[in-house]
Image: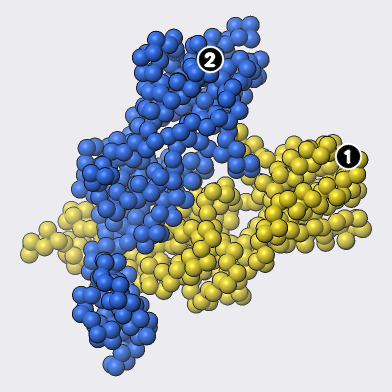
Chain colours: A yellow, B blue
Amino acid sequence: MNKAGKAPTMKDVAREAGVALGTVSKVFNSIPVGESYKIKVEEAAKRLGYRVNSYARGLRADKTYTVALILPSLDNPFFALLADHICVALTKHNYRMVLAITKADPHAEARCIRMIEQNMADGVIGLTYAADLDVNENLPYVSIDRFIGPNIPCISSDNFGGGQMAAEKLVSLGCKKPLFLRIGSDVPGETDKRGAGFVTYCQMNGIEYAAQRFSDWQGIESVYKFLDEHCHRGKLDYDGIFCSTDLFAYHVKKHLESIGVCVPEDVQLIGFDGLKRPETDEFYCSTIVQPIQQIAETAVYILLHGASEQFPGFMSLPVSYAPGGTTRE
Amino acid sequence: MNKAGKAPTMKDVAREAGVALGTVSKVFNSIPVGESYKIKVEEAAKRLGYRVNSYARGLRADKTYTVALILPSLDNPFFALLADHICVALTKHNYRMVLAITKADPHAEARCIRMIEQNMADGVIGLTYAADLDVNENLPYVSIDRFIGPNIPCISSDNFGGGQMAAEKLVSLGCKKPLFLRIGSDVPGETDKRGAGFVTYCQMNGIEYAAQRFSDWQGIESVYKFLDEHCHRGKLDYDGIFCSTDLFAYHVKKHLESIGVCVPEDVQLIGFDGLKRPETDEFYCSTIVQPIQQIAETAVYILLHGASEQFPGFMSLPVSYAPGGTTRE
């Protein structure tokens, strides 16, 4: 309480600390001041029992210290890990994370973006598949895995390089006729470059290859049908397969085994993501590993500090290969 | 813009809609009014381009429409699913969810609770293992899986009933000497009742049983050592094991197989959680299934509406048994 018997104000804190009001404001808004000033203000605030009113702070500094993360769901382990790392990275920067899960709701993304317009968040990190995404280019927005527009930073793994790496690995492990298989959304995204990288490597190196793309609405059965049609007396037409994700590779492996094709003896398989089984912490398959933590930390950094020469608005972060039992190495 | 050329206010909306200012306030604060009034206000707001200022709303109605969820992490699939369902349930109630991940940080929970004191959230849903949890009983807080105090609602699965169910199932499937195994935190919690339910069933029914509890700091190796010591010439001293979680059951199964004990032929295993493999959507093991969605929706309902006769402050939600390959049924 101050002398008037009311809750203490920033002015009271400034008087108690013997510093200017602006200094108190800077400390409470996490704007750098000299360490001795910071300590003086914090000690005075503690003595007086002063509590920062976050609304007042939000209004005054035009900041909410809140970032919204838009994800399709948390039941995919890749999304859950990404959310985990983004939340931890934001906390380190003294930001909190509002999580918005879109599921199949086409209005969920628009709702999130309206939330920022209503001053409820300072920015958005979004990983979305909505076909009609309408991002106001003046809003702080960082996109993951999808290029939205030249003024919207986009962070992803090096999908193209990962596709090249998978093709090169299969070839170096002896594959003569590798295949690229993909199933996913019809909305174009950065992850489409996985196949492009694979195809480019094969073309540049004169490798005979095939590439087959399926849409989610066609279902995994259409992939199985394709494999069945290319399997003659227990022998597949291809001796290596690069699958667009790890969980997809898992299903392809199971189906191949069900029709008598052995992995990795007859066909070698490489997935993409680097997911680990929750029960054993082992990879599901040989895989191109995404740097999930680095994607999270880079997205947070660019959202909070803006793109720069060191952190350009379009970043593809390096991936790596990890053997996981579905290749000969 | 209103006539004075400024952004429209609630007063402008009331005039445009031909309703009282209080009616407009109710609509924007989600307080029920007649449907025709609601439509009038919403249409007037749309015509004027009025945007709710969430800060003003937060201050005026003393509400932020924000709930904080405190979880240890998202890398455990149970926590990720719980967060997914809580987020969706809050969205349905027009609330947004701030996610706080505590990891090993003992101060993270205190920080969250301070956030509410600073008016940044209307309440908290917490699933925490911090030993020194200090919850102000006047704060809206709903605890999951841990009883904190008589005035803090606590939602969990029926852990005791689930333990009884596991014992009854093992016995009905022919087990003569069942064992309960547990590894986990030293902090007491509702999940401790899994073992208590198991033991109680065995005692009440004159079943010879054993129960062995390990702490996280002892490590899974201490469990393996215990199993090795109770295995003689390929035969375990027990013919059924109830494990405190599914992922733990998975490790117990792998270890038993590594020392020549077959599951479910020699030993039947039941876990707890009802987790499914991300790659196949199958259970990891025969299991007591937690109603994760119902836990999430009940926690949200009680936080927003308070406990009542229908929704008392301490709820154990019904679990069910599902076979998953580690029992004879």
- Give the CA separation, mark 2 to mark 1: 42 Å
Q: Secondary structure at mark 1?
A: loop
Q: Quadrant of the C terminus of chain A?
A: top right
The residue lying furthest to the top in this view is B233
- Eye-nearest disc, 2 or 1: 2
What is the crowding at mark 2: few (fewer than 14 residues within 10 Å), some, or many (at least 20)? few
Tell whether A227 sits left or right of B323: right
Query: Is label 2 in contact with label 1 (beta carbons under 8 Å)?
Result: no
Which one is nearer the viewer's eye here, B262 or A202? Answer: B262
From where the camera sits, is residue A290 visible?
yes
Provide residue B91's location: percent of width, then percent of height.
40, 59
Q: Residue at x 81, y 39 (%)?
A: A259
**Pointer 2 indicates a residue of which chain?**
B
Q: Residue at x 45, y 67 (%)?
A: A112
Tag shown at residue A95: none
**Residue identified by numbered label 2:** B174
At which x and y percent is residue B244?
46, 27
Picture layout, residue B268 above or below residue B2: above
Q: Residue at x 57, y 25 (%)?
A: B329
Residue A95 appearing in the image: no
Q: Amino acid at mark 2?
A: Gly
Relative to B107, B260 lies left or right: right
Q: Tell me the number on the disc at residue A234.
A: 1
Could you say where residue A248 lies in the image, as x and y percent from the top left?
Answer: 70, 48
Q: Position of residue A31 (x, y in %)?
A: 37, 65
Q: Is residue B310 above or below residue B66?
A: above
